[in-house]
Each structure stands twice: as structure tokens, then as C-alpha cells.
Image (spheres, rainbow, N blue to C red):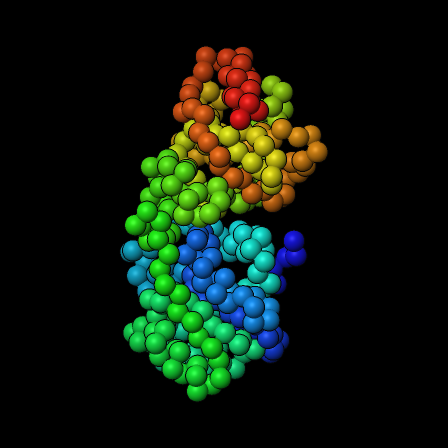
Amino acid sequence: MDAVQVYEGLEAFTKARVTCGLALGVFDGVHLGHQAVIEAARGFGKLGVLTFDPHPVQVLAPERAPRRIIASLEHQKKILAELGVDFMVVVNFTETFAARESRDFAEELFLTGARRLTAGEDWSFGKAREGNMTRLAEWGRAAGVDVMAVGAVELDGQRMSSTRIREFLKEGDLEGAARMLGRPYSVFGKVEQGRQLGRTIGFPTANVAVGMEQLPPNGVYIVQGNGIRGVANIGTRPTVADSSQRSLEVHLFSEEIPMEYGWDLEVSFLQKIREEEAFDGIEALKKQIGRDVAVAQAH
């Protein structure tokens, strides 16, 4: 799996003159609706996505912006690589950018090497969001660029939505989130130094810093870390820590997986085993972890 190339801004991408199909939008989570937009851009040379950072709602209506995201840009790159995407164009979204005329932004897109542009049918852009897919298609015909609006993707009558996925996660419904994502929900972050208690009781763990990505509710989970089965605890570690800060600790069933600090780890949540508990000392905690490991290994 080749890494996704990143172009910082439209100018850098245009200079590269990449013949491609280009999917447009905000791909937080890269759920099945996003994947339909990306798939519609396949077959026109290289396959790419154009997205915005920060999320437009954080600039235009910060009071409505979600407190947590589903996938950071670094995480999106990993997910997109698995989908066969070749590159990502990241446009810095500012109030100045948002105030640009929609036709000007469209003309910039037409000057790239894109042979097809795709987006959701309700995607809008430019000053006062005056640009839409109907206008983009009209302007594209004049410029010789194919434009395709992709209809909403639904599952059991529900439209694919990053907001709905976040609601599933808050409710602890991993299955609902996975169905909209087309894969188990995962978070992505760097292994950071912890208290190293796990090493002393026979269950070494990786403390994963996930930034703004949303964690499922507190508890113990069967997980996969970079494809290796394991168990994870989300919570405040009441037996060994006096803290209200949530953390993610992962124990993987392989001695071949490095746990060096700064190492990137993607953790996929497969099933919840139990709630987080406070135990009567380290020995009781150790026995329970052993039972958790046995449950995870049996599944």
C-alpha cells in the first residue's frame, strides 16, 4: 500500500499537473457516503481527494462545530491509502477563502489536471455558498471538465452522516458506526510514555494519544492495533490512577509489535467486553486483565 501524497493548497497541486479524477468535500471519517464520491472519481488517471483544513464549520459557525472528529488528516491519509487513493489536496480554509466568489474557485479547479470532479449532490462552495453542483457542472462543460454529483447514500433509511456516526459512538453502538463506515471504527495516534505499570504485571500496554478523535465510551474492548488482535481500556484507570483524564491503553497479542514512543498506532474497536472497574489492588486487576485477554483471544 503506497502512501498518499499530500499537496498543500491548490497552487501546489496545479503546478504538479496531475491527470486525475478529483473528489471534493470534507471527508471526516471517510464513511460509505464519502467513499461513493471518491469511487465516482476513479478511472480518470490518478485518484485524489480535495479537502479543507480546518473543517469549514469551525470557521463559519464555531458554535456548531463538533467537539470531536472521527478521523484526523493523518488518519484520513491512512484510510484513503487503503481505498487506493493516490493523493490528497489540503486547502487551508479561512474566512478570506470562504468569501471568494464561487466561480473563481471553480476556475481554479478547472486549471488543475482534473478530468472529472465529483462531490455530493448537495455540496456548496464559495461566497454565501452560492456555488453548487448544478453550476459547477455547467461551468465544467464550458471548460471541458466532467462534473458528477453523487446522490446521498442511505442505510436502512438513514443517510450516511459523520454526525450520526458520532451519535452511534456516544451511544456505544460500535456496530451502527461500523455499518456506516464500512469498517470497524478506529482511532489513530502516537504511542506516548505512560506509567509502565502494565510491563510489571505481565501485560505491557501502549498509551495512545488520539488528539481530537472521538473515543467510544469508557470500558474494556477487543481491538486490533495495526491489524494485531488485542485488548484496550478506555477510561480513568481508577485502580492505579487518581485522575479524571481519559486515556486509551492497548495491549496487543504479539511481541513483534514495537511499542516505542512516537510510534503510530491505529486502534480498531471490535467489541466491548465490560465496563471499566475499580479493583481491590493490583493483583485483582491483573487477574481481571487475564480474563479479558482470554475473552478476546477466544473471539
Q: Which residue is pictured at 35% across the width and 79% down the height?
A: 135
Q: Is residue 34 above or below residue 293?
A: below
Residue 163 at what x, y percent from top left? 34, 50
Q: Which residue is pictured at 49% across the width and 22% down the height?
A: 240
Q: Is residue 54 above or below residue 268?
A: below
Residue 216 found in image quarter: top left
Q: Which residue is pictured at 47% across the width and 77% down the height?
A: 146
Residue 22 at what x, y percent from top left? 51, 69
Residue 202 at what x, y percent from top left? 63, 20
Residue 147 found in image quarter: bottom left
Nearer the observer, 102 or 99 = 102
In this rendering, the count of numbered labels is: 0
Q: Is residue 109 left or right of residue 17?
A: left
Q: Is residue 68 left or right of residue 128?
A: right
Residue 190 at what x, y percent from top left? 57, 43
Tell me if residue 67 can be seen. Answer: no
Tell me if residue 121 can be seen. Answer: yes
Q: Which residue is pictured at 56% across the width and 43% down the height?
A: 266
Residue 273 found in image quarter: top left
Q: Is residue 34 left or right of residue 258?
A: left
Extreme residue in the right direction: 256
